[in-house]
Image (cartoon, rainbow, N blue to C red):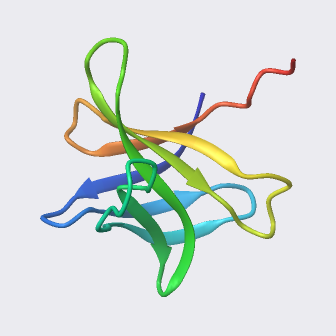
Amino acid sequence: MAHIGTFTQQDEGYTGTIRTLTLNAKVKLVPVDKDNDKAPDYRLLAGTYELGAAWKKISNNDRPYLSVTIDDPAFATTVYARLVEAEDGNHHLHWSRPKAN
């Protein structure tokens, strides 16, 4: 599992940085008004550009996290990651390569 970002929870959403080999961006997770159950809870924005979305989830250990999708033209495919609260109070964005079928 790779650590690709660090976020701080704000009154409205989260702010942080995502760093990969091809992306180094200051971003925000901004809450959205959901119009249906499948709609995301947050939009992932870099400035005015939308990079993805996030959904609130609960782990098997009953810990809340955000399931985050990140899409960028430099990526071969969409990146799926998890934003989890760390012991230091920050929130860390982790990515794991999907297992081949």
**Outermost bottom residue:** 48
Q: Position of residue 40 (x, y in %)?
A: 43, 56
Task: From the top left corner, tell me how far across and down residue 44 is, in percent.
Answer: 47, 66
Query: Which corner quadrant of the image does residue 16 belong to?
Result: bottom left
Left or right relative to 40: residue 30: left
How many numbered circles are shown? 0
Closer to the camera in the image, 22 or 55: 55
| Residue occupying the point 61% across, 57% down | 70
Residue name at image x 36 percent, y 21 percent = 59
Q: Is residue 81 left or right of residue 30?
A: right
For residue 99, which quarter of the picture?
top right
Question: Can you say which quadrant of the picture contains the N terminus?
Answer: top right
Vertical relation: 5 (above or below) 13 = above
* Horizontal relation, residue 69 to residue 93: left or right: right
Determine the residue positioned at 40% across, 51% down.
Answer: 6
Residue farthest to the front? 36
Question: Which residue shows up at 54% across the image and 71% down it?
Answer: 25
Q: Quadrant of the C terminus?
A: top right
Residue 29 in the image, given as x and y percentages of width and height: 37, 64
Q: Nearer the viewer, residue 65 or 26?
A: 65
Which of the two residues, 78 or 39, is positioned nearer the viewer here? Answer: 39
Residue closest to the eye, 101 or 95: 101
Residue furthest left in the image:
11
Q: Position of residue 77 (x, y in %)?
A: 80, 52
In the picture, residue 10 is in which quadrant? Answer: bottom left
